[in-house]
Image (tube, rainbow, N blue to C red):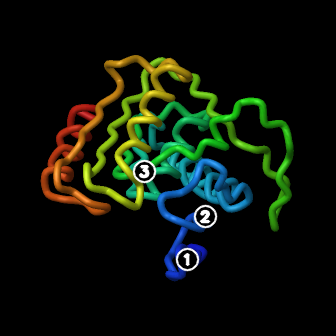
Amino acid sequence: MDRPVTFCQGQRRPAWFNVWRLPPGNDEYDELGVSESISIIENIILAQVHSGIDSRKIVLVGFSQGGALSLMVGLTSLHELGGIASLSGWIPHHIRDVSQASIIRSRNSDIAPKQMIYTGQYLPILWCHGANDNDIPDSYGEDAISFIRHSLYIPEQCLTYRRYEGLAHSINDAELGDLVSWLMQILG
C-alpha cells in the first residue's frame, strides 16, 4: 500500500500523516491525514471481520507513527480488538479532546473526527519505548499511558509499559522478544 510522503525537518519520509518536526509538538496535528489513515485501517479491520476473523484476534502493532496510528484506531474503534502494541509511539494531544464536533471533508467522503472513545471492558496495551529516544521521547509514552489510565480508565492489568535503557528511536531484540511474549499471552 503506498503511503503519503511527508517532509519532517527537511527529510523526506513515508508517512501515515504529516509530522512537521520531531518530537511532534502538542499543537501539531494533521487532521485530514490522521482521519484518512484511521479510515484505511478501519476498512482493513472490517474486511477481516467480514472474512470471518474474530475481531478479538486482531491486534494492531506499529512503530513510531505506526504506533500512534495503532493507538488512535484501537482506542476509537467500535470493534472489540485483541490488543494494541505501540513501539516508540505517542497519542497526539488533539485527538484526546473529546469535545470535537466538526466534520472533516476528505477527497473521498465526509469523515467524522475520531475521539478517544474506548468502550471495551478489556483491551490489552503493550507500550515499548527506548529510554534514549530523541525523536519520540520516552516522556511521550509515559504521558500517553497516564492519559489511558486516568482519562479512559483502562484497568492497570491491561497496560504493560516496557522501557529499554540505551535504546534510541529504533527496535532491539529485547523489545521484539517482549512483543512476541505479549502476543502469545493475549492471543493464547
Which residue is nearer to you in this view: 130 or 50? 130
What is the number of the mark on residue 2?
A: 1
Q: Label 2's element?
A: loop
Could you tell me if residue 117 is visible in this image?
yes
Determine which residue is flagged by label 3: 89
Residue 79: x and y in percent read: 56, 34
Q: Mark 1 and mark 2: span between their CA atoms?
A: 12 Å
Q: Is residue 117 left or right of residue 184?
A: right
Q: Is residue 56 above or below residue 14?
A: above
How busy is the neighbourhood of tag 2: few (under 14 within 10 Å), some, or many (20 plus)? many
Q: Residue 52 location in percent, x, y?
A: 49, 43
Q: Nearer the viewer, mark 1 or mark 2?
A: 2
Residue 28 rendering spot, x and y as whole percentages: 64, 55
Side (left or right) of 42 relative to 171 = right
Quadrant into which the C terminus falls: top left
Q: Tell which tag, 3 or 1, sits nearer the viewer.
A: 3
Determine which quarter of the picture holds residue 30: bottom right
Above-or-below relation of 2 to 95? below
For image coordinates 56% across by 44% down, the residue present is 72
Q: Which residue is mark 2?
A: 17
Q: Position of residue 131 (x, y in %)?
A: 25, 49
Residue 64's quadrant in the figure? bottom left
Is there CB contact under 8 Å for labels 3 and 1? no
Query: What amino acid type should be assigned to the residue bearing mark 2?
Result: Phe
The answer to which of marks 1 and 2 sits earlier in the sequence is 1
